Image (cartoon, grey):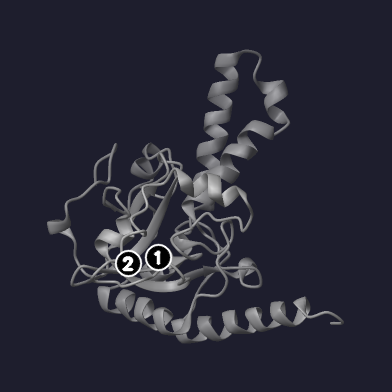
Amino acid sequence: MGVFSNKIGREELKPGDHIYSWRIAYIYSHHGIYVGDGMVIHFTRGAGQEIGTGTALDQVLFSSSNSRRDVLCEACGDQSVLDGVIKSCLDCFLDGGDLYHFGYGVSPALFLAKARGGTCTLATSDPKEDVLHRANYLLQNGFGFYRIFKNNCEDFAIYCKTGWIVKTNLSAGVGGSGQVTSLVAAATAIMSSPLRFVASSFAGLTVVASGMYCVSRFMSDIGVRRDVDKVPVERLVALLNNVVCEERAEAVPGN
């Protein structure tokens, strides 16, 4: 893995790899698990709208994407109405983008050098047999509701690779996405009140904010944080199904 890019060629892919591809001018990346034979298991909100809001804003967001979904794929068929955990060919997963490999067990130095989240983690990957078992089990049984900030495609892929979940987020999603924690770290660095007193110049502000961003992002990585549990996929599905049932019951008028 290079410091500046995780891009790889298709010939380098191995079953059990966590891969991703950038979407909409590098605003965010979509993640999945390569399972071999040119196929990827991934978690999506539906019709590839991984950052969909469910509002009219989606028309603006996805009108600028390089979507191939107006062309019926011979390998995948019509996946335009599917959501949750799905299996797609590599071309449909990439959606016209480049192929990148997500790094596991990286050093702290390399992790911090990758200033943008969602590219690597200090956590180590389990054997490919475990990774593929989790991915295929979740393909059949689901991964709960898709939520951008709490239970997204990166959370899905990280769980498949490690089996780790954030305990405090079980009732609202799995959590642990590097992209999300980077956003939180950036917001913390910018909005934190000590910055007003420590930094007396733009250069000082930049140094302090960068330091706070790195520390916050590092401490939020699933390979470092202590509020995590290793949960068998069968138990995780049961827990997530309970959450789904509770949320559906709450949504019924009169409950």
Left or right relative to 139: residue 55: right
Left or right relative to 75: residue 242: right
Q: Nearer the viewer, residue 172 or 225?
A: 172
Q: Is residue 219 visible?
A: no
**The residue positioned farthest toward the right in the image shown:** 254
Q: Position of residue 113 (x, y in %)?
A: 37, 37
Name the amino acid, label 2: Ile
Read off the residue under disc 2.
33
Residue at x 51% of width, y 64% of height: 45
Name the amino acid, label 1: Ala
Q: Nearer the viewer, residue 151 or 181?
A: 151
- Which quarter of the figure is the C terminus placed in? bottom right
The earlier-in-sequence mark between 2 and 1 is 2
Read off the residue under disc 1.
157
Left or right relative to 46: residue 13: left
Residue at x 64% of width, y 84% of height: 242
**The residue positioned farthest toward the left in the image shown:** 11
Q: Is residue 243 visible?
A: yes
Q: Could you say whether the residue bearing mark 2 is in a helix, strand or loop?
A: strand
Q: Nearer the viewer, residue 162 or 187?
A: 187
Location of residue 199 with respect to 158 vertically, above or below: above
Residue at x 31% of width, y 73% of height: 77
Q: Could you say whether the residue bearing mark 1 is in a helix, strand or loop?
A: helix
Q: Position of residue 35 (x, y in %)?
A: 26, 72
Q: CA distance from mark 2 to mark 1?
A: 6 Å
Q: Are marks 2 and 1 in contact (CB under 8 Å)?
A: yes
Query: Which quadrant of the structure image shows residue 203?
Result: top right
Using the image, tell me which numbered label, if any, was put on residue 143. Answer: none
Q: Nearer the viewer, residue 119 or 219?
A: 119
